[in-house]
Amino acid sequence: MILGAAIFEALGSATLASTGSAFGMPEQASTLAPQVDRIYDIINWICGFFFVVIVGVMLYFMFKYRRREHVADTGGPTHNTLLEVTWTIIPLILVIAIFYIGLEGYVKIRTPPQNAYVIEVIGTRWSWAFNYPNGAKLATPNDPLLVPVNRPVKLLMRSNDVIHSMFLPAFRVKQDVVPGRFTHLWFEATKEGKFPLFCAEYCGTQHSQMVGTVEVLSEYEFEERIDIEAKWMDKVPDENLHLAGTLIYNQCGLCHTLDGSALIGPSFKETHELFKSGGSRRLADGRSEPVTEAYLRKSILEPLAQIARNHQTDKAYPSSMTPGIGDQLGPRRVDAMIRMIMRLDEVTDDEWNLIPVNRADIVVEDSEDE
Ligand code: HEC
Ligand SMILES: [Cu+2]
């Protein structure tokens, strides 16, 4: 009786758009979240209910029919039509109901509204890049994914290398990002604030670093922020481009160190020293290329065209630098990275740590903006 009431209540309260998160779930921050939590709750309650019923009856029978002296063995029953029909029909109704609620939610999650705000997402080992319709470019780990509150947002996603997966737990959405095709997901954030963002598909050694934040802003703040993001790079005068590079370096930092230690790729310190001394880089195919500005540009735009060899071990580095990275950055950012590598000694301290740069200090505002 009590159990019956409990499950009834759970189903009932869950059906009225539930307010709190389901058991063990993070905060709800999108319009889809209550629906996902509802079905999760319903399935949990069904499992709990049948666990208690089945295990309860089992324990009771274990006790009731335990072996006792002076009781003759009898053959067990072999067939009971009513019982068998019951234990077939009840689960059948339940799974059909679960399928129906699940399908309803699935269709909703897979169908972005027509008027959704589209953000292009690119997964690259091991960062997420976000391109906005106004030209703003953001990328993890330093930047958040900025989205407006109370407005449907569609992420149009592709991968530059391997399979990644965009996972936004507070919005209850997750979608694989697969090389060679576009995938999408959508959500409508209901709360301003910061929520975690993960890559949920093991994508190589630094997979655990492929995390970030999604920041939900009011419509006004959102427009203002992406407007600044779209314009700042163009406001950096050429003489400050190497400093701007230090603000983008984080996208390369998972593979290129600054202090001389080799990671996935050569340290930028080594590249810088070769550039400064007019040295050459030995390549995997046996050639040697002088490290010039043109060499650096080609390394970024066509990483597979010239695979560098490690100077100490003379082994070729893996050809794992992402071919699309130059397009993703765009010409101005590529220039910034090249200049940062060429002038690395100027943007780092004695230990080759980056000297912090404030974006506001390196941009020049147009006179009409002042
Ligand atoms: C997934 C790892 C990875 C990322 C991310 C990455 N690179 Fe690379 N990079 C490599 C590897 C591996 C090599 C060596 C093989 C080759 O030459 O392509 C390399 C080589 C280079 C070289 C040639 C260096 C030399 O001394 O010959 C340059 C320049 C370079 N990368 C720039 C960049 C820049 C700029 C970024 C960030 C926008 C970046 N890379 C991001 C892996 C990466
Ligand atoms: Cu990943």
Image (spheres, grey):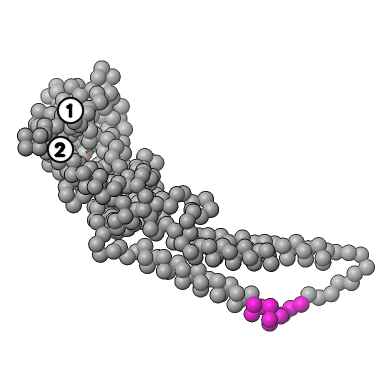
Kindly identify the residue that appears in the image at 63 percent across and 65 percent down.
Answer: 5
**In this picture, residue 42 sits left or right of residue 350:** right
Disc 1 from disc 2: Cα separation: 12 Å
Q: Position of residue 35 (x, y in %)?
A: 44, 61
The quadrant of the picture occupied by the C terminus is top left
Q: Position of residue 176 (x, y in %)?
A: 35, 55
Q: Quadrant of the N terminus?
A: bottom right
The quadrant of the picture showing ligand 1 is top left
Does the magenta-highlighted stretch encompass residue 287?
A: no
Q: Is residue 78 magenta?
A: yes
Which is more toward the observer, 162 or 251? Answer: 251
Whether residue 50 appears in this view of the structure is no
**Which residue is the site of mark 1?**
361
Q: Nearer the viewer, residue 215 or 305?
A: 215
The answer to whether residue 126 shows anywhere in this view is yes
Mark 2 residue crowding within 10 angstroms, few (<14) / some (14–19) / many (20+): many
Q: How many marks?
A: 2
Residue nearest the viewer, comparing 215 with 119: 215
Q: Is residue 18 left or right of residue 299?
A: right
| Among numbered discs 1 and 2, the one appearing first in the sequence | 2
The disc placed on residue 136 is: none
Question: Does residue 30 lie above or below 144 as drawn?
Answer: below
Asked whether mark 1 and ligand 1 are closer than 8 Å, the reply comes as no
Farthest residue, direction left? 367
Identify residue for label 2. Answer: 233
Left of 147 or right of it: where is 52?
right
Instruction: Name the quadrant containing residue 265.
Output: top left
In the image, residue 148 sits, relative to residue 70, either above or below, namely: above
| Residue at the image point whose x is 53% and y is 62% from the top | 13
Residue range in magenta is 77-86
Q: Residue at x 62, y 62 (%)?
A: 6
